[in-house]
């Protein structure tokens, strides 16, 4: 059986991976720009699907929409021990030049998804604007095959062959308040040593997220506070002469 036929069966039936029962948990899903892709096309960037879920995720089914006059293709990257596939035959295109891509990510061994899926986004040649990627439908499955309620937002992404200069700053974490994890977003204007640390309300170091050299650019790192108590925490970024702190609230 071809992969494309297998994907059709999984997506249409959902019999094994995606059960009809919905959990009481809710997850948040967002794209974030990860980095440039070392490819022949200078208009290719890497986007990361950030998943914030209270329960373990075993599989993902997604429909995402994009404008074909701006984006040439969106291709999921492979994940070790996971089946990652999208089906062009299930994609559809309307008169507005919007295309919907349907895909699925799951493990035949029942493994838990412990990394955020990544997608190569290739822009149309010479496109330099900001294009919108929109979720029409996304389903997460827990270890029992039940679906997890999902909140997702549209995402604006642009090619970075000639990127706008970055400002060194610590941006708003999302979500905040959070449970049990949050994405800490920051950018650095120049190459150099960067530190991102988490402190508790008493000023004690809780976790070291980043401590090393980073190239200038935008970054996002997830802090999982599963083993921490509810309360107030602080994310502190040090990059060159810039020191910034942000309050984080963990609610369990």
Image: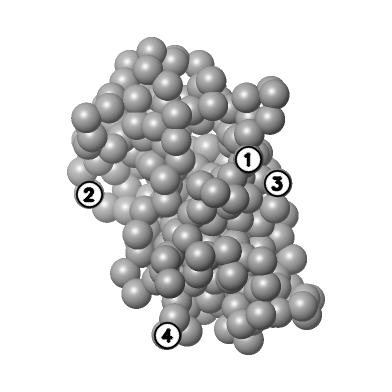
Q: Earlier in the sequence, mark 4 or mark 2?
A: 4
State the residue in front, 243 or 147. Answer: 147
Q: Crowdedness of circle 2 by 10 Å Cα count: few (<14), some, many (20+)?
A: few
Q: Residue beneath label 3, please?
A: 136
Helix, strand or loop status at disc 4: loop
Q: Position of residue 212 (x, y in %)?
A: 22, 49
Q: Earlier in the sequence, mark 3 or mark 1?
A: 1
Q: Which mark is residue 109?
A: 4
Q: Residue beneath label 1, please?
A: 92
Q: Position of residue 6 (x, y in %)?
A: 50, 69
Rounded to the nearest angstrom, the CA distance separating label 4 from label 2 is: 36 Å
Closer to the camera: disc 2 or disc 3?
3
Rounded to the nearest angstrom, the CA distance separating label 3 from label 4 is: 28 Å
Rounded to the nearest angstrom, the CA distance separating label 3 from label 1 is: 12 Å
Q: Residue beneath label 2, please?
A: 212
Q: Earlier in the sequence, mark 2 or mark 3?
A: 3
Rounded to the nearest angstrom, the CA distance separating label 2 from label 1 is: 44 Å
From what the image shows, is residue 66 above or below residue 22? above
Question: Which residue is rendered at x = 51% and y = 47% of the image?
Answer: 88
Q: Position of residue 226 (x, y in %)?
A: 54, 75
């Amino acid at each position: 059986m071809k992969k494309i036929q297998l994907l059709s069966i999984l997506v249409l039936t959902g019999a094994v991976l995606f059960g009809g029962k919905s959990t009481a948990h809710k997850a948040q899903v967002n794209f974030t720009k990860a980095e440039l892709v070392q490819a022949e096309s200078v208009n290719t960037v890497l986007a990361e699907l950030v998943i914030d879920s209270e329960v373990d995720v075993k599989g993902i089914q997604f429909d995402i929409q994009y404008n074909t006059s701006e984006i040439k293709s969106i291709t999921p990257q492979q994940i070790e021990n996971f089946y990652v596939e999208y089906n062009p035959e299930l994609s559809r295109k309307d008169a507005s030049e919007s295309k919907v891509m349907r895909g699925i990510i799951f493990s035949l061994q029942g493994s838990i998804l412990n990394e955020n899926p990544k997608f190569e986004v290739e822009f149309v040649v010479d496109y330099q604007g900001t294009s919108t990627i929109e979720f029409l439908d996304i389903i997460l499955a827990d270890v029992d095959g039940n679906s997890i309620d999902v909140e997702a937002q549209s995402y604006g992404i642009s090619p970075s062959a000639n990127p706008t200069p970055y400002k060194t700053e610590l941006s708003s974490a999302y979500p905040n308040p959070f449970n049990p994890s949050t994405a800490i977003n920051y950018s650095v204007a120049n190459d150099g040593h960067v530190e991102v640390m988490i402190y508790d309300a008493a000023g004690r170091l809780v976790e070291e997220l980043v401590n090393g050299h980073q190239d200038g650019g935008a970054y996002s790192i997830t802090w999982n506070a599963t083993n921490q108590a509810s309360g107030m925490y602080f994310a502190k970024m040090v990059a060159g002469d810039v020191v910034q702190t942000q309050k984080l609230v963990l609610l369990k």
